[in-house]
Amino acid sequence: AQSVTQPDARVTVSEGASLQLRCKYSYSATPYLFWYVQYPRQGLQLLLKYYSGDPVVQGVNSFEAEFSKSNSSFHLQKASVHWSDSAVYFCALSPRSNYQLIWGSGTKLIIKP
Amino acid sequence: EAAVTQSPRSKVAVTGGKVTLSCHQTNNHDYMYWYRQDTGHGLRLIHYSYVADSTEKGDIPDGYKASRPSQENFSLILELASLSQTAVYFCASSDWGGNYAEQFFGPGTRLTVL
């Protein structure tokens, strides 16, 4: 069965520190993978996406993610977080066979001053 | 210009009443989706549509109907609203052929059923 797991419901980091948000997926082939961000009381916005090729993909606001087929992972990273990065981050998978998105449960990122 | 808009942005409804949530997109996308989000949880797919005048059930369709009268418009209908339907509802659109299922979201509708 296809699934996306975000094992950390909440992550707290200090402003200026580095960040990694974890995402593991279950799918028999290589899927399309996405990270979305939801700022308070707003809709979801796409941060970055992976289709194929270079396993490290760059996104908006200096976020990047690395696809690992061997680990079935697509972790989100940022070298130095800012208070404005406080939000909920969702990882999602799209099977290459159809249009639907399968969503993780989200990770709430809290930035300490 | 916002490409996916939703109305109303918030609504308070009474139990047993009828609620209609509207979504309009200017992306020229074929696919449209309705999700609900409960506090502290991810998104769950209620209904979706890939062509006008046709809708499909998602993962949690019970208690909801959908209507797609045109490519641009997609409505979610709660015929008999219940307390358990209090949530934030998001509409999204996508173009499977062009964007590999990347979805574009509206700002959400916060529904409170009393």
Image: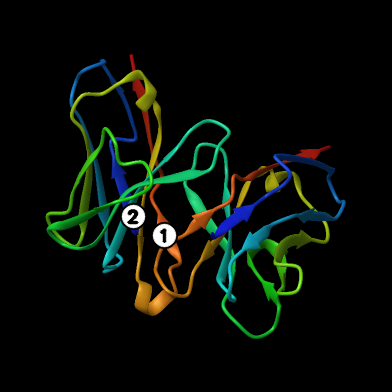
Q: Which residue is mark 1?
A: B104
Which of B99/B56 is in front? Answer: B56
Considering the image in quadrants, where does the C terminus of chain B appear? top left
Chain of the residue where label 1 is placed in the rendered structure: B
A59 sits to left or right of B61: right
Q: Residue at x 78, y 60 (%)?
A: A78
Amino acid type, callout 2 = Val
Q: Residue at x 21, y 17 (%)?
A: B16
Q: Is residue A87 above or below residue A27?
A: above
B32 sits to left or right of A103: left
Q: Quadrant of residue B62?
A: top left
Question: Tags 2 and 1 in contact by the CB under 8 Å rule?
Answer: yes
Can residue A63 be spotted in the picture? no
Labels in figure, total: 2
Can residue B40 be spotted in the picture? yes
**Residue B4 circle label:** 2
Name the secondary structure under disc 1.
Answer: strand
Amino acid type, callout 1 = Phe
Residue A48 at what x, y percent from top left? Answer: 60, 67
> In this view, which residue lies farthest toward the front?
A1
Residue B8 at what x, y percent from top left? Answer: 28, 35
Name the secondary structure under disc 2.
Answer: strand
Q: Residue at x 69, y 83 (%)?
A: A54
Residue A59 at what x, y percent from top left? Answer: 64, 68
Label whose residue precedes the other's in the sequence (2 or 1): 2
Distance in Å between CA atoms under marks 2 and 1: 7 Å
**Residue A9 circle label:** none
Considering the image in quadrants, where does the N terminus of chain B appear? bottom left
Residue count near mark 1 (Cα–Cα under 10 Å), binned few <14, some 14–19, many ≥20: many
Q: Residue at x 86, y 51 (%)?
A: A16
